[in-house]
Amino acid sequence: QVQLVESGGGLVQPGGSLRLSCAASGRTFNNYHMAWFRRAPGKDREFVAFISASGGITSYADSVKGRFTISRDNAKNTVALQMNMLKTEDTAVYYCAARTGNNFDYWGQGTQVTVSS
């Protein structure tokens, strides 16, 4: 089992950057595939980015490709989401999630990102 805690959210102007971090408990972090999701006001939760357990495979939603970068440090049990060129439509609560099987079974509490001038 793993517990996830996100941090790094806040208010930023359009075109700005933020770096989200997710700290995981447990000694088997490097067994988990990790991802970031987000939920904007009035919308369903959507996938943002994925990174495999080893870090060798990443994937992104089309809406963030080229602007966001997911990374992980298995020695520190952390996964990060670097967000550049932020847009107002990136405003959402961002969640870190972990899985070993087919489903993301473990979720953090979320961190708010607001992009506004």
Image: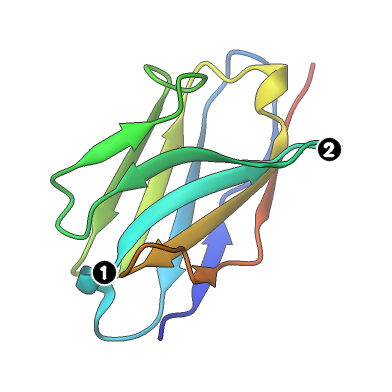
Of the numbered discs in the image, which one, if any, rests on residue 46?
none
Residue 114 is left or right of residue 78, and the answer is right
Identify which residue, 83 or 11, lies in the foreground: 83
Q: Position of residue 62 (x, y in %)?
A: 45, 20
Q: Is residue 82 above or below residue 95?
A: above
**Amino acid type assigned to the residue bearing label 1 in the image:** Lys
Identify which residue is drawn at 30% across, 70% down: 77
Q: Quadrant of the N terminus?
A: bottom left
Q: Position of residue 85 (x, y in %)?
A: 52, 16
- Residue 114 falls in image quadrant: top right
Label 1 or label 2, whichever comes before in sequence order:
2
**Amino acid type assigned to the residue bearing label 2 in the image:** Pro
As helix, strand or loop, the secondary structure at mark 1 comes to loop
- Distance from label 1 to label 2 (Cα)? 32 Å
Q: Is residue 112 above or below residue 43?
A: below
Query: Mark 1 against mark 2, which lies toward the viewer?
Result: 2
Q: Position of residue 46 (x, y in %)?
A: 60, 39
**Mark 1 sits on what residue?**
76
**Mark 2 sits on what residue?**
41
As helix, strand or loop, the secondary structure at mark 2 comes to loop
Identify which residue is drawn at 58% across, 54% down: 95
Residue 13 in sight from this viewpoint = no
The outermost residue toward the front is: 102
Neighbours of disc 2 within 10 Å: few (<14), some (14-19), many (20+): few
Residue 112 in sight from this viewpoint = yes
Q: Position of residue 24 (x, y in %)?
A: 40, 73
Identify which residue, 16 or 4, lies in the foreground: 4
Q: Is residue 71 above or below residue 28?
A: above
The outermost residue toward the right is: 42
Q: Is residue 27 above or below residue 84?
A: below
How is the rendered protein coloured? rainbow
Identify which residue is drawn at 48% across, 79% down: 3
